Image (tube, grey):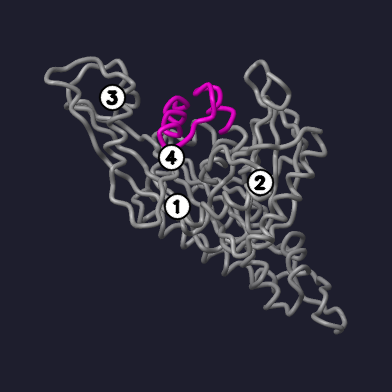
Amino acid sequence: MTKKERHIVALDIGSTKTCALIGELGDDGGVKFAALGAAESKGWRKGQIVNLDLAVSSIRRAVEEAETIVGVPVESALIGVAGTHVRGVNSRGGITVGTRPRDIQREDVRRAVEAARGIQLPEDREVLHVLPQEFSLDAQDNIRDAIGMVGQRLEANVHIVTASGSATQNIVTAVNRAGVRVDDTVLEPLASAEACLTQDERELGCCLLDIGGGTTELLAYSGGVVRHTAAIPVGGDHFTNDLAVGLRTPIDEAEKIKRLQACAHRELLKEDFPIEIASVGDRPPRTVFARMLSDIVEPRAQELLMLVRDELRRGGVESSIPAGIILTGGGARLRGFCELAEQIFNLPARVATPRGLSGMSEEDSQPEYATAVGLVLYGARTRRTAGARPTGWVGKFKSMFAGAS
């Protein structure tokens, strides 16, 4: 296997940043960090492309930076898909394997999952993932792996993730125009889960919140499998805009203040200290106080968490996440947000940094790179289990099934 063949390339194209991360497969099956290229995202809004040429330019810059580090051209990549156009739904379907009970084969499982997948989709919707949950065989329910068991009627519960066909195709087109072939499209929070969640959290039940610039992606696990997916149309950029408007300061200044000074939970403020901020135009700088920042940021943080709670209730999983809330994405770094989540949900919460790639520096092991790291790990696992890059929903199902524990 050549050095180029060992490389797995991930493209995380978000509303705020575009990053290209290259991992290298080792002989021991592990994955080593090779390079990271990042560029400011342009031409995006809420997870969808609004200016193709600007989006292509951002992708090209990120890819070229990563290529320069490894000295090998990037020809193909896995890309993340996210945004408010993504939907998740649970479905059930089954097959009769014969006139009398017999051993269940992998092909039977595939057919049962295909039957469960057979839901009527609206026009311009395409299936992104079919994620198996449990199987039932005759009178026995809650079977994790039915292969080798004996029965006559096999049914499957699955979680189906769909996306807007046109929105997804626009992303693929942008990546292609940047000179990169798309190996696979992966739901971004599913990729982030690869890098951020422990098996104990998946089994016990948890909710992953991937807080991006324009949206927050939600993924709920229970019993080791995905139970609910959704996207909330609020992200880190909303906090920045609130500060820019409330403080009458430029967007860049508001972003800097958010990262360095803002706190989403005013109970954590021990003292109300002064902060000098830039004014709009030629006006002189002004002084504001830390509590004023919290008065602006905390209501938005509460709104986001309330929307998450409503979504968990709608999906019927609010009481199935005792392992708590796991925060990742760039927005997870907002001070006080984790503590506020603990208070609102009355559950444990933590900020997750991506794990799984050896040789990654502390500077690169930040929540905003969780999706990119997860995409590389996802690609490594599918390559190991399938022996080749899977294509289409059947390939994705096989890789997810093979990777289930």
Q: Which mark is residue 367?
A: 2
| Residue bearing mark 4 | 205
- Mark 3 or mark 2, earlier in chain: 3
Please identify the quarter of the rendering in which residue 397 is found. top left
| Closer mark to the observer between disc 2 and disc 4 | 2
| Residue 229 image position (x, y, % from top left) | 43, 49
Question: For the residue marked with disc 2, what is the amino acid?
Answer: Pro
Q: CA distance from mark 2 to mark 4?
A: 21 Å
| Closer mark to the observer between disc 1 and disc 2 | 1
- Residue at disc 1, secondary structure: strand
Q: CA distance from mark 3 to mark 4?
A: 29 Å
- Residue at disc 2, secondary structure: helix
Quick check: can you spot residue 348?
A: no
- Mark 2 or mark 4, earlier in chain: 4
Q: Which residues are magenta?
A: 378-405
Tell me whether circle 3 and circle 2 mark residues in contact (CB < 8 Å): no
Question: For the residue marked with disc 3, what is the amino acid?
Answer: Asp
| Residue bearing mark 1 | 163
Q: CA distance from mark 3 to mark 1?
A: 27 Å
| Closer mark to the observer between disc 3 and disc 4 | 3
- Mark 4 or mark 1, earlier in chain: 1
Q: CA distance from mark 3 to mark 2?
A: 40 Å
Q: CA distance from mark 4 to mark 1?
A: 25 Å
- Identify the residue at the far left of this view: 99
Question: For the residue marked with disc 4, what is the amino acid?
Answer: Gly
Residue found 30% across the figure and 18% down from its top: 105
Residue found 57% across the figure and 42% down from its top: 192
Q: Which mark is residue 108?
A: 3
